[in-house]
Amino acid sequence: MLVSDIMSKDPVTVTPETGIHILAELFVEKGIGGAPVVDGSGKFLGVVLEEGLIFHDKKVHLPSFLHIAMGFLTFGVQRFEEEVSKITASNVSKLMEDQVLRLSPESTIESAATLMIEKGIYYCPVVTDDVLLGVVTKKDIVRAIADETK
């Protein structure tokens, strides 16, 4: 069985300009944990996940500040700027992940499941030539396994 057989073909998408509160409401309303980010022409740009919203909403107190500051010293300016950008984000463009695991529609479910487990990533866009075709989540994999046993 292929990824194209189990992917959600019409996922809820957002744009980089989508506001943080609108994103949170969308996640709750639709019962989803992530969304692909696309531009006005439909080009796939990345994904935004619940984890990004949770990270955004954390309070910056002294231990967090020190953690971020130590990250600055340990990981450099870029990592420090990414952390601060996420905490202060007002829209999806600051929370989205653009370097994400992308699946091919021709990939097997077994190879997709292996990649997801090895990388610890459970929300994967299915993309061809920067065009979003769908998404595969861990629930899609579990559903496929359940269907195989019938």
Image: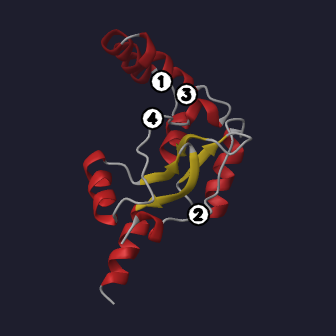
Name which residue lies at 40% across and 44% down.
Answer: 101
- Frontmost of labels 4 and 2 is 4
Disc 3 residue type (three-letter):
Ile
Say which label, 4 or 1, has the lower sequence index.
Answer: 1
* Separation (CA) of disc 3 from disc 1: 6 Å
User: Closer to the camera, 62 or 97?
Assistant: 97
Disc 1 residue type (three-letter):
Glu
Name which residue lies at 51% across and 58% down.
Answer: 135
Q: Which residue is mark 4?
A: 99
User: What secondary structure is marked by label 4?
Assistant: loop
Q: Which residue is mark 2?
A: 31
Disc 2 residue type (three-letter):
Gly
User: What secondary structure is marked by label 1?
Assistant: helix
User: Closer to the camera, 140 or 66?
Assistant: 140
User: What secondary structure is marked by label 3?
Assistant: helix
User: Closer to the camera, 97 or 50?
Assistant: 97
Residue 107: image quadrant is: bottom left
Q: Quadrant of the C terminus?
A: bottom left
- Frontmost of labels 4 and 3 is 4
Q: Which residue is mark 3?
A: 87
Asked whether the beta carbons under mark 3 and mark 1 sit within 8 Å of each other, the answer is: yes
* Separation (CA) of disc 3 from disc 2: 24 Å
Disc 4 residue type (three-letter):
Gln
Say which label, 3 or 2, has the lower sequence index.
Answer: 2
Residue 29 position in % (x across, y down): 67, 61
Residue 72 position in % (x across, y down): 39, 12
Instruction: Report whether 84 appears left or right of 37.
Output: left
Say which label, 1 or 2, has the lower sequence index.
Answer: 2
Residue 14 to residue 64: above or below: below
Q: Which residue is mark 1?
A: 83
Label 1: how many residues lie within 10 Å, few (<14), some (14-19) or many (20+)?
Answer: some
Asked whether the beta carbons under mark 1 and mark 2 sit within 8 Å of each other, the answer is: no
